[in-house]
Image: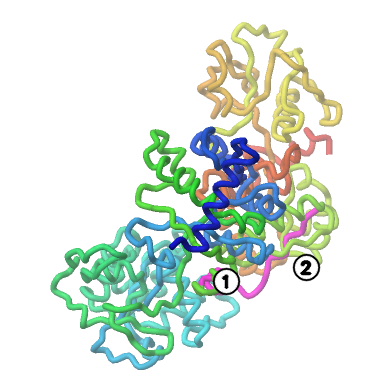
Amino acid sequence: MISSYQLLLVVAVTLVTYCHGQKYQAVFKLCVPHQIITACQDLMAKPEATVQVECIPGRDRMECLEKVNARQADFVAVDPEDMYVAYHMANQDFSVFTEFRTVEEPRAEFRYEGIILVRKSDNFRSLADLRGKKSCHTGYGRNVGYKIPITKLKKLGLFKLATDPEMAPLEKELKGLSELFGSSCLVGKYSPNDEVNRLLKKRYPNLCALCERPEVCDYPDKYSGYDGAIRCLVENNGDVAFTKVIYVNKYFGLPVGGAPAKPALNPNDRTDDYVYLCEDGTTRPITGPACSWAQRPWQGYMGNGDINSRFQLLQQRLQQFYEEAKNSVASDKASQMWVDRRNVLVDREVPVLPGEHLNRAQYKDVIERDGPFQYKIKLCVASELEQEKCEVMRKAAYSRDVRPEFECVLKGKNACVAAVQRGEADAVVLKGEEQTIDNVDGLKPILFEKYDDGDVMVAIADQGITRDQLLKSPLEFDVTDERAISAALFLNDKRHRKTCPNKMSSTPAAPIRIISAQELTRLGSNKVLVCPSLQFEPIANYASCNVDYTLPAGIFVRKTVSGQIEDNIAHAFVALSEKFGHGAKTEVVFDMFGEFKPGMKNVLFHDRAARFGQADNKVGGVEVGNFKRLMCL
């Protein structure tokens, strides 16, 4: 007997295939970040299919969520963190209808389950019994081995942050763990600053005592990672391991998914000797269902409410795409489209709302983890466009565990400087020309934008250019690029042709061009560089022969701000650029240093910046006073 679901599907396919005797193609619009639009178009193209997928470019995944919500696209591929953003946009109008699951566990509801593994003989009766125990973690800052345990144990009142107001927030967590557990293995970099990292490990040596190399306490370590945490418990006399269910099954030779059990990694240890510790203090045998503290949902395809009545057609087309893409010779493009031979697409019979999905997984609590930071960074912005970008950045950052959280405050640039001086805002981004105005005296820079090593501005000319042409010729440069303008001003100054930015113009096909060194590979072999000394050098020497005179955008705070607050603000901006800077894995989530809207360049930050770095106040030896003179300020 045919089910009602199957009947509806047959009718839908029939209606889509034929309309008044004519073949008809259903079209669904998939939004992808602009960096992978070519991969999407190449792999999704199937002209003969009755169900077509049209690739729609977005600035990044954050804009794709907006496009799906606004019906400019139908669906988008998302991480759980993107589901969280959608949940706060229009939860009732988004739904996850297909998931990327592993071949190993295609029937698992969630990607992984974070659990606590303990010895049965230790007779745990409550979570309070964890105090003083020897703990084994996957690694510092990781979800299962760090964030989930701290989030849950803090919520239950067992883990407490240090209250010392002079202590760095990140150190408060480490101190709390050090006081909760007798000894641990918690490898990783506690700070991006090598000296601070070394001092923290020296200050809290018990956090590294159970590691294979306590004096190093970093990867690789036999007792780190998901399986390493289990080895730390079983083979290194630990008391509690924070890890995933699937690795427990593999270690002890239990079935994974629907596959038969494989030999145990350590055949000398019995499954009867270990149990899962639950939130209520009870325990469960590891041979049965786990009591996980939090789960991470699978990645998936999420659409808007308009496709809820026809998502089954789309599921069929996506299944076809995924299996074909697995065998594609364009493996790089397939990878960009989240195609992995180790994965399969699993269709949901009933789509799930992102909020319900995250709550059921208890993953919403993990995302909303404040950690040791108890306040927000008020970032002052100068225009409604900057505020719009700031708000997108704030949502992306919060969902991806960038803390402290940001709050966007609209004031206007000069008003922003005053607001930071008065303490009404915490930070403001000032471009090079804005750093020379008189009232920044009450502020100080803590970070500056950095550019990729090969991204410097150079002046190029034909090899046969004469000395007279070099001194008198007009310049060609991008008048919308502030770096190109300052480079042109710098070269003109060296040629004793003093001009101001508002009186400069670019001459098409001029004998001398100002370009980025990144464009040199596209030029012919008959070009030479013009150095600031007005000498010529081969184009390969751009690192030492360039006209880059850029004063980069800086993050400015009040001069009198406490060292602790300053460190917190710097930490958040560095974390931002590590997550969303040029070349970062999650740059496709939020294109922090890219063009925010078509034709709107350098909104809040410079489009070609790559990351934030220490406040050395210069790029290529730029002196603030001379920069002010060149810019006629």
- Tell me the number on the disc at residue 356: 1
Inspect the magenta stretch and tell me whether residue 469 lies in it: no
Residue 371, image x and y in percent? 55, 73
Q: How many marks?
A: 2
Q: Is residue 548 above or below residue 190?
A: above
Secondary structure type for disc 2: loop
Q: Is residue 358 above or below residue 52?
A: below
Residue topped by disc 2: 423
**Identity of the residue drawn at 85% across and 57% down:** 415
Residue 106, image x and y in percent? 37, 60
**Identity of the residue drawn at 72% across and 14% down:** 509
Q: Label 2: how many residues lie within 10 Å, few (<14), some (14-19) or many (20+)?
A: some
Residue type of the residue flagged with mark 1: Glu
Residue type of the residue flagged with mark 2: Gly
Secondary structure type for disc 1: helix
Which portion, as a residue range, is magenta? 363-382
Residue 556, image x and y in percent? 71, 56
Q: CA distance from mark 2 to mark 1?
A: 40 Å
Q: Between tags 2 and 1, which lies in front?
A: 1
